[in-house]
Amino acid sequence: MLGSKTLIFKKQKRKRKNGKSKKSKKIYVSKKEEKITKSHQITPKQEVEEEDDEGFSLKASAQSDSYGVQPLGNLYFNPSYHNSRNTGLGNLQTLTDELVLDILGLLEGTHLGILSNVSKGFYIFCNHEPLWRNLVLETCKGGFFFKGSWKSTFVSAYKQPSIPVLSSGLKVRDFYSDYLFQSWLCANLEMKPEWLEKDNIVRRRGISVDEFVMNFEEPNKPVLLEGCLESWPALEKWNRDYLAEECGDVKFSVGPVEMKLEDYFSYSDQAREEKPLYLFDPKFAEKVPQLGKDYDVPMYFNEDLFSVLGNERPDYRWIIIGPAGSGSSFHIDPNSTSAWNAVIKGSKKWVLFPPDVVPPGVHPSPDGAEVASPVSIIEWFMNFYNATKNWKKRPIECVCKAGEVIFVPNGWWHLVINLEDSIAITQNFVSRRNLLNVLEFLKKPNACTLVSGTSDRVNLHDKFKNAIEAYLPGTIDELTLKDEEKKAQQKKPSFWESVTDSKAGAFKFSF
């Protein structure tokens, strides 16, 4: 949500260097909480001057909100001070927008369509696209063919002419809502240049496996590796035409549904929403074996100890496909594993925080079972990104491009957003460096609720430990001993601490 900030949405004209002008849409954030009167209105000159600090640019393809929703700040410029949201909702106007939508989310499609005819307020709320998206995803598990909007898709899938599908040209005057406006705003905002310019990750090319282990995997530090995908056939072959032809009618996991690639590409071309669906399939190589042959695990990640479990291992590799704006909000990879992510087509913006730093706006539960975070990735950048500029432990950031691989150490928080249509491969792995962490994670009392990608969550710890001891006898004991020695070394006082009298604060001499 927007919090205490008020968005003011206005059209303005800006002069080009050649003297011509063009229309552009800008959004500005007011830092004052008091009501804005006419004397407080921002002039076009002030708007241009404040653009670098407070302005957000819209995508070239952005169109005005389909139903005329405006941010609440614009209400203060309305002489009548009339908000058709409140009159349209009647006694329900005291409810928050989120609560109204939660209630409407309990209705079926036909009832939503009927209710949308009751008033202007209900017309806006009942046509909120995420409501229809949820209906499609709940009822079309076998896939769908996107029809430009989620409501049209639902009606088309179930051939329900009783649900009114009104033209997007029908707009409601004087409807103000920050919550509804932000959904449209986040879907149409360009990434600000300042969100992309920071690149403070360590980059390496041509290092040895020993160098990687010593400098990055052992100390648990991220690194971006260049030049290690050059032998991958996927780097040359994997485009839309090749994948659609190779995969044919095979369906892949897209959120809670299964879709053919051809249908997913059709959706992603039309998607203009806050959180585009992400194709994220863990069984792609089993479904289409050729895809598994088109890439090799980079040599830095060849040790894969979960492989001792055979077919009982948790999910560990995924093909990832998504349009610009899709991605993953802040999370820690499952089962305390480390990961690598290789971009085959497109580019991705990464933001990573070390295990002891929780990202701003992210609130994990004490047991780690749940994570509360902003609704969308763009919302996090809008409201929380700048907060990290003055932190002592600032995030690691980079843009990972086609042909590059990023190493994500275990326990690190990370957010990823696609900057363009992207295709990638990612794998989670267990090596000797993080084996003890994984075993400790699997031993947690609530591990059965946290472990992902396996049919036997309850017994996974014992199965994995026994398999390691059978295939690599003595390894766990050896690693445990080294870990204890390392911890003891860290606790060992330095020379100066050993010769200081802790009570008097002076040196002590022993003969």
Image: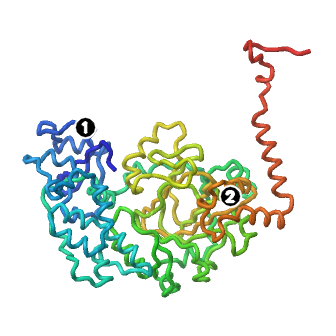
Residue at image mark 1: 33
- Which circle, 1 or 2, is nearer the viewer? 2
Direction front: furthest residue = 91
Which is more N-terminal, label 2 or label 1?
Answer: 1
Tell me the kind of residue under disc 1: Glu
Direction left: furthest residue = 80
Of 494 and 100, which appears nearest the observer? 100
Q: Is residue 234 above or below residue 352?
A: below
In this rendering, position of residue 228 left or right of residue 421: right
Q: Callout 2 environment at 10 Å: few (<14), some (14 to 19), or many (20+)?
A: many
Dividing the picture into quadrants, the one containing residue 22 is: bottom left
Q: Is residue 211 visible?
A: no
Q: Is residue 371 above or below residue 500?
A: below
Residue drawn at the location 16% of the way across and 56% of the way down: 90
In this rendering, position of residue 320 left or right of residue 93: right
Direction right: furthest residue = 511
Residue at image mark 2: 442
Query: Disc 1 to disc 2, how far (Cα)?
Result: 48 Å
Residue drawn at the location 30% of the way across and 61% of the way down: 103
- x and y percent of residue 354 in the render? 58, 46
Q: Secondary structure at mark 2?
A: helix
Q: Is residue 154 above or below residue 54?
A: below
Q: How many marks?
A: 2
Of 271 and 158, which appears nearest the observer? 158
In the rendered structure, find residue 413 and report the number of the disc placed on it.
none
Tell me the kind of residue under disc 2: Leu
Q: Secondary structure at mark 1?
A: loop
- x and y percent of residue 45 in the render? 18, 42
Q: Callout 1 environment at 10 Å: few (<14), some (14 to 19), or many (20+)?
A: few
Residue drawn at the location 35% of the way across and 72% of the way down: 135
